[in-house]
Amino acid sequence: MGRIIPENSIPYRIIYYSGQFLIRSLEKFIALSVPNEKYFETKDFEWIAEIEKDWLLMREELDGLLEERDQIPDICDISEEQLKVVNHGQWKSYTFMLHGHEIPGNCAKCPESYRMIKSIPRIKTAFFSILDPKVEIAEHRGPFKGYLRYHLGLLIPKDRKACALRLAGQIRHWQEGKSLVFDDTYLHDAWNKSEETRVVLFVDFIRDMPWPLLKASEFIVYLLGKSPFVQNALAKIRL
């Protein structure tokens, strides 16, 4: 396991705030160069149709993982930062990739899921997001406007209206085998008010933008991958 830098330490905070300044500075240029959309039309992403066509293969692998649900880590155990938006023990994460770093063991356990995930252009983060019943995720924003976020509904409660994503005041409900694409740098929250578990495939991929900004975004993601925030999480996932 790599050395973990405590999240309340001075070195961690110096790196964190320096990184945030760099990210927010680049985001100002990205915002001027990309569509000012909250939700995006899935038909504009050619790869989504293929994933939706084979989604039941991913669901089958998910079902196998959920048989040993206690082995899937809580997201707050991976990153203490998540305690700002959800209580410990309410949200689990089975991670395939985090800011460009793959988790080989997890990918090997779900070969069909991994195959589909790898078909997403410029993908950098992917995990099964497992939300317990009667849980709310507090309002927050995503890490970087150079990303778009993708959700694929995998296990949605029968009363799907009881589960929702609210992005800048606009509410969407997940549906099994169907996709959402959105800019998660708008303030958003989510909830599962049902009596059943909700699972989506959660993906961040670098969005289309002018070439210089695309390369700058790749560099930002590289730096994120080297940051204590990500390196700490990777060390905990690999325990």
Image (spheres, rainbow, N blue to C red):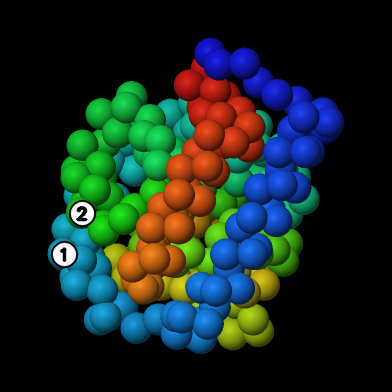
Question: Which residue in the protein does label 1 denote?
Answer: 50
Residue 60 seen in the current view: no
The residue depicted at 38 percent of the width and 58 percent of the height is: 215
191 shown above or below 10: below
Q: CA distance from mark 1 to mark 2?
A: 9 Å
The residue depicted at 70 percent of the width and 24 percent of the height is: 5
Residue 34 x, y percent position in the rendering = 44, 80
Residue 83 seen in the current view: yes
The residue depicted at 26 percent of the width and 80 percent of the height is: 44
| Residue 55 located left or right of residue 220 | left
Mark 1 packing: few (<14 Cα in 10 Å), some, or many (20+)?
few
Question: Which residue in the protein does label 2 denote?
Answer: 119
Residue 137 or residue 228, whichever sits in front: 228
Three-letter amino acid code at disc 1? Glu
Mark 2 or mark 1, which is nearer the start of the sequence?
A: 1
Label 2's element? loop
The residue depicted at 38 percent of the width and 30 percent of the height is: 103
Residue 117 or residue 199, whichever sits in front: 117
Task: Give residue 190's mark.
Answer: none
| Residue 125 located left or right of residue 60 | right
